[in-house]
Image (cartoon, rainbow, N blue to C red):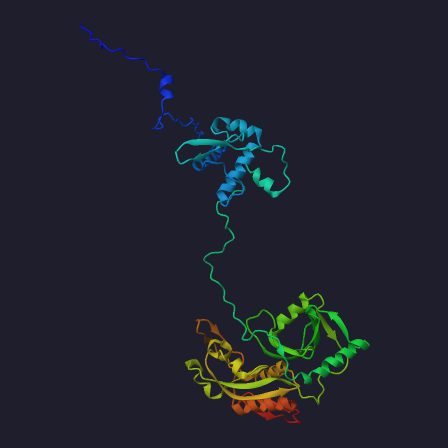
Amino acid sequence: MIRLRSSKVVEKIKLDDIFSEEDDLGLLDVIPLKVKAPAGNILASQFEEVVHFYELNGRIPSIDAQTFDEKRLARRLKAFQSNPEQCKALLQFDVHGLLQGEATVVISERDEKVTEQPLSVKPDKSELVTSLDDIFDDDDDDLLEFDAPDLFIIRHVPVEKKEQPDEIAKRQPCTDFHRYSPIFALVQEELKSGSASLERFRHELKINVGDTFILNGVMGYVHSAGEHLDGYSSYNARLHLIFANGTEMNMLFQSLTHGLVRDEQGSKIIREGTPLIPNDTPIPTGLVYVLATKSTDSALAEYKSNLYKVGFTDGTVDERIKYAEKDKTFLEAPVRVVMTTECYNIDAHKLETLIHGFLGHRRLNITLKGHSGQTYSPKEWFYVPLTTVLEVIKYILDGTISLYRMDNTTGRVVKKKLNNII
């Protein structure tokens, strides 16, 4: 066998020669060998998440981070660092020195050279549990971690639209305050003399028309009450209030009583003796009105010739019926004003109760379907001749209503027989 030999002597290359040459392609950049967390090792799997974050971002997670996940990992790493037993168990997985605070931050330069800066992360192993944060930091098993911190955000729930009152309470100058100023002067004198006293307001005391009170340091007087408002769990009506500083406002009964309870000095004035309104002082207490409906509902066809609503307001009738088409009180239809008259020195709410009570057996007793599809029963409409409604109002206002009764068969007002003895 003939062996051919090269005439040129080949120089031997050592490993040092290979590593000393420039590695432009980065072939010699070897990533440290990581030990894979065994299946079922929860502690190692949790630590792997921290390691993955470090490798992805070039830094350890920060407790002051903006994201919930990074804060969670930062708390987890801090818990590992402060637990010697866990550090020992995880040491084989800690290829970057995260557990001992020796991790480095990788900074990329424009020339693609890599430099490392050591982090000074020193766990405080003597830290005691003194706050909720300490409890969360010691949550090694992530029992207190929540990936969705919006558990209390309500979704897919229809918003309940609460009907707004027809008027918003707004204080304004009282143009006829001279009519009411004697009331406040009288109550002031009674408080000075001791015949009247202040009692810290509570809901059990109630507030009625003709009462006086102290709200936010100002004396007020309940001049009148409007119609009873539906849709509330307890009695509510709009009150006309006069204040000793010469202003007036319309406020809901419940708003007034709640305001008196919240006010630390809120009080009701307890009086003895005669009512505040003398009989010879004409003070307007509201408007009584009679309405007829323009509804085209076929269910009302047989009643429309003698169907009337009687109501009261301490504002204007036009304001009261402005949204009649949307209000079940007005049968969700336009209305026609038949009659209005101003009342003086009378509790409008009691007047309304008297009229409705007298006409009670002629109340419209049917069920209607509203625009929304829900059914309702009208409460303030009466199937009687117009002359009957006008007579009842007249007899109540002049004080002779006790002499009359209602003929429930004909719907007419008839005089009582004085010698009606059976």
- Figure quadrant of the N terminus: top left
Question: Which residue is situated farthest in the left direction here?
Answer: 1
Q: How many numbered marks does the figure carry? A: 0
The correct choice, above or below, for 149 with respect to 264 in the image is: above
Question: Which residue is situated farthest in the top direction here?
Answer: 1
Please indicate whether residue 251 sits to the left or right of residue 76 in the image: right
Quadrant assignment, res 133? top right
Question: Which residue is situated farthest in the right direction here?
Answer: 193
Q: Position of residue 168 (x, y in %)?
A: 56, 73
User: Which residue does the image show at 43% across and 29% down from the upper left?
Assistant: 36
Q: Is residue 72 visible?
A: yes
Q: Position of residue 407 (x, y in %)?
A: 56, 89
The correct choice, above or below, for 360 with respect to 160 in the image is: below
The correct choice, above or below, for 415 with respect to 184 in the image is: below
User: Which residue does the image show at 20% across and 8% down from the upper left?
Assistant: 4
Please indicate whether residue 225 sits to the left or right of residue 77 in the image: right
Query: Which residue is nearer to you in this view: 233 or 283?
Result: 283
Q: Is residue 412 visible?
A: no
Q: Where is residue 274 in the image (x, y as percent from the top left)?
A: 75, 83
- Figure quadrant of the C terminus: bottom right
Q: Where is residue 368 in the image (x, y as percent from the top left)?
A: 46, 76
User: Which residue does the image show at 63% across and 89% down from the upper left?
Assistant: 397
User: Which residue does the image show at 51% across and 78% down from the upper left?
Assistant: 329
Quadrant assignment, res 88? top right
